[in-house]
Amino acid sequence: MKENETVMPDDENEEKALSTRLEQRRQAAQQQRIRLFLWTVFVLLALFVFTVTVIKGYGMLKNEMGKEVAIRKLEEALKEKDWDVLKTYIRSDTVPVNEKALAPLLLYLDKHPKAYAALRRDLEQQWKEKHVYIKGLTSIPPVFTMKVYETQFFMFNQYVFEPTVYSFVVRIEEDAPVLVNGEKVEGEATKEPLVKKYGPYLPGMYEVTVITKQKQKTKTVVLFGGERVREVTF
């Protein structure tokens, strides 16, 4: 043994070795906890993504089915004249939706049953092609525009139908009374003399009567598709 070499006691060597082993175990346990935490985060994230994907897919399927159900219920309500359902599904910010306002529409459908097929075809076209009518840019709007009234549970849509509101202009003698479906109405003056604008009206069939000094004239005006403003000539 060299003179300057220091010999450590056995107890001190064992204590240092034990401390080293404990530190290694502590670090191994810490790394294991980190790996477990990261794995847990990964599993939870994957589960979240999977759940959102499934719910979103189900929501899309549910919304597509919801459109078909809404169209069918609207058609059935029109045929059966179910006022409660009609008031639920038909929404307008311009004309109050009530029995009086809807009567011309039901009259037209009763006299023209083929209009149901045209109505469904128009709504399905909006649904499949995502056709959008932009007021002021599209001259010929659909009879009804399918819209989302509210979103339930952030994904499932509730659909309603917004009817196009129509008006018509009439050129008549000054102060000649105008009746729509037997009720006297007041027209709005236009830039042209002797021409007044009447409306707005929901889609349907209307009887427009003008009482002149010579005689009374009546015409049937159909407001179901086509341009929003019609000219009625007598």
Image (tube, grey):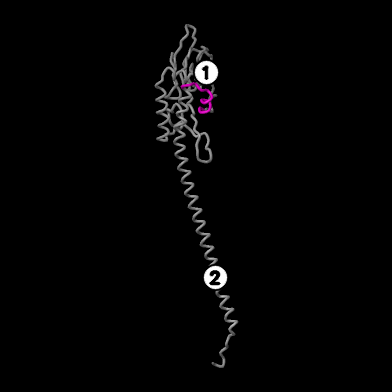
Question: Whole-Å distance between the Cαs marked 2 and 1?
Answer: 92 Å
Say what secondary structure mark 2 lies in: helix
Q: Residue at x 46, y 22 (%)?
A: 79
Q: Residue at x 46, y 37 (%)?
A: 63
Give the amino acid type for the residue marked by disc 1 in the picture.
Answer: Gly
Residue at the top extreme of this rendering: 214
Q: Main secondary structure of the magenta part?
A: helix
Q: Which residue is mark 2?
A: 25
Which quarter shows the C terminus? Answer: top left
Residue 105: where, in percent of width, then height? 47, 20
Q: Which residue is mark 1?
A: 187
What span is in magenta?
79-90
Residue 223: where, in percent of width, then height? 45, 21
Q: Residues within 10 Å of mark 1 (few under 14, many from 20)?
A: some
Q: Is residue 62 above or below residue 167?
A: below
Q: Residues within 10 Å of mark 2 (few under 14, many from 20)?
A: few
Q: Residue at x 48, y 52 (%)?
A: 46
Which quarter shows the N terminus? Answer: bottom right
Residue 30: where, in percent of width, then height? 55, 66
Q: Is residue 23 left or right of residue 221?
A: right
How many marks the image carries: the answer is 2
